[in-house]
Image (cartoon, rainbow, N blue to C red):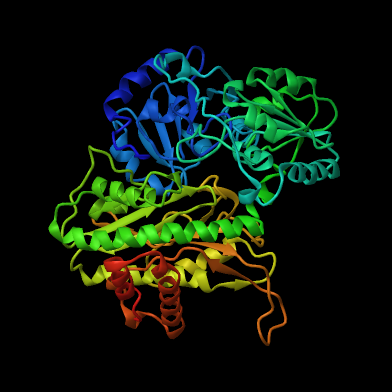
Amino acid sequence: MFQQYTATTSPKTGAARLADLRGAMDGIDGFLIPRTDAHQGEDVAACSERLAWLTGFTGSAGMCAALRDIAGVFIDGRYTLQVRDQVDLAAFTPVPMHEVKLSDWLIEQLPDGGVIAYDPWLHGFDEIEKLALAVSDKGISLLKSDNLVDKIWTDQPDPPKGMIQPHGIEFSGEESVDKRTRIAVAVADAGQEAFVLTLPASICWLLNIRGSDIAHTPVALCFAIIKADGRVDLFVDPDKIDFAVIKHFGDGVNLHSETELTLALKRLTGKVGVDRNSAPVAISDLLENPVWGSDPCILPKACKNAVEIAGSRAAHLRDGAAMVEFLCWLDGEAPKNTLSEIAVAKQLETFRRNTNALRDVSFDTISGSGPNGAIVHYRVTEDTDRKISQGDILLVDSGGQYQDGTTDITRTVAVGAVAPEVARYNTLVLKGMIAISMARWPNGITGRDLDCFARMSLWQNGLDYAHGTGHGVGAYLGVHEGPQGISRRSVVPFETGMILSNEPGYYREGAYGIRIENLVVVSAPETPTGGEIPMHGFETLTFVPIDRRLIVADMLTNPERDWLNAYHHEVLTKISPLVAGEVRIWLENACADI
């Protein structure tokens, strides 16, 4: 199995480890421990799980500010429930970062000023600059330091050594040399001699390679420098490279050990581009003449080409058939009252494995029944595994990594008869998902502009959800990809070929969670009949039935009902040839008009 179900952390270890950390805080008043690694990634290798090791919190975003008398664990709205279960609340204080800024918290906790240390390899320049400015007037200073967690983590795992694999033109749709040429043009046009790439996904996209250093995300941990003439210096553990990869690179890609990066950065002359949002402070410190700019691979990577979109469509049909087999199985097994959350997640992975194309799950499956479904990023373990009973609501958020595409889908399922209020809330969430699916917009519109579409029906009923409506998705890369998104913070205009999730939700603490998610791709702008302005829209990629037992038909408008029925017709048309027997019969019933 790709997913593991053993709890990797415990609240019981937090207090002792925090005491050890404080013992290492010589001459300082606090130390910052982020979730990120030197590549500022959301997903990190085991050796970089410093936040989880220290605090017990395993969420994909967060930070601990460990002071001598208090240690705040900063989390966003997705993790307000999870953090309370995972950390020792006598040692660590959860702090909602969407309500309390780190700078304000430090000022409150250190009224007489103080020194806060940080590892410059784990924080972006923009982040540190803003924090330093915000606290400077109160006498608080920031100090670059060796990583204090590494000093006390005596059994820290070794860095990963996953082998790099070429990602063929049949999947990438563009040769690496052509990508390098057009990125080099962008670097030269910006007046730069070179650009330092620190994001593994950008480097893997640029060089048409994939790796296995991060669980569920096929990237290789590495750094690169792309020159204005198109040459690339790649800094990577040589044990990850074999002859096939060297042959794949051809001319124009020079290989170096990771240990050579520091000297190479110091030797760069002229203007050298670096992304102040994602590159660690240590990178810009080593450059003679850093110039701030955006990673030049980010936007081209986000705008999928025709081959990548075709691959994503194929991956979603394959994945959709596996999901339909799973949902049919679930409807047959759930009434027996023998299933647990882990059993559900394992069986879903089995159906995906049976496609013989699955490379990995795209993230740990969220299989949350009853109150566990209200934990937005719930990860079931052997300690939390809950039996699924009649009357439960089961939220299953999952995805697969296939060479031709990355999938991510959430379905909320009724297990037996459920309370009428649940169907009402589910329908409000569905209305929001349909609103995004039906949206049309002119050039220049951003995720911030569309986010309210998904929330309007909930807002009108005094409800909301504490996460974004959608995130970008890679092409056999990260299931979370920037810069595109659908949220109040998303200010990047949508462009043709961007793939995003569409996943509004509603969560009642202690009771259940509801989320419905499809992936969509931004279509090329077209002028509607009778219109004057070209409009973008979304093409739906995900084709899996939405549980009709949780839909109150009378709450849907005629256009919403038409959309849902048309969607289910398309699901039936596309998926029925891929399944047989009782699964096909189940699918026909699940896709009936409402």
Q: Quadrant of the C terminus?
A: bottom left
| Residue 495 seen in this snapshot | yes
Q: Tell me if 422 is positioned left or right of 140 in this view.
A: left
Q: Nearer the viewer, residue 20 or 346?
A: 346
In the image, is residue 341 above or below residue 143? Answer: below
Residue 258, above or below 125:
above
Residue at image position (37%, 71%) is: 428
**Residue at 57% from the left image edge and 62% from the top image edge:** 521
Residue 555: percent from left, percent from top:
35, 80
Q: Is residue 161 above or below residue 349?
A: above
Side of 382 relative to 191 (left or right)? left
Depicted 95 relative to depicted 351: above or below: above
Q: Residue 330 at what x, y percent from top left?
A: 25, 59
Of residues 341 and 17, the one nearer the viewer is: 341
Viewer-closest of 328 and 435 = 328
**Residue sitting nearer the eye, 249 or 191:** 249
Q: Residue 543: image x %, image y %?
A: 44, 66
Compared across the picture, whether 502 is left or right of 388 comes to right
Residue drawn 15% across the image and 52% down it: 338
Q: Quadrant of the N terminus?
A: top left
Counting labels gives 0
Residue 491 in view of the camera: no
Q: Position of residue 192 (x, y in %)?
A: 83, 37
As drawn, is 309 to the left or to the right of 417?
right
What is the quadrant of residue 524 in the picture?
bottom right
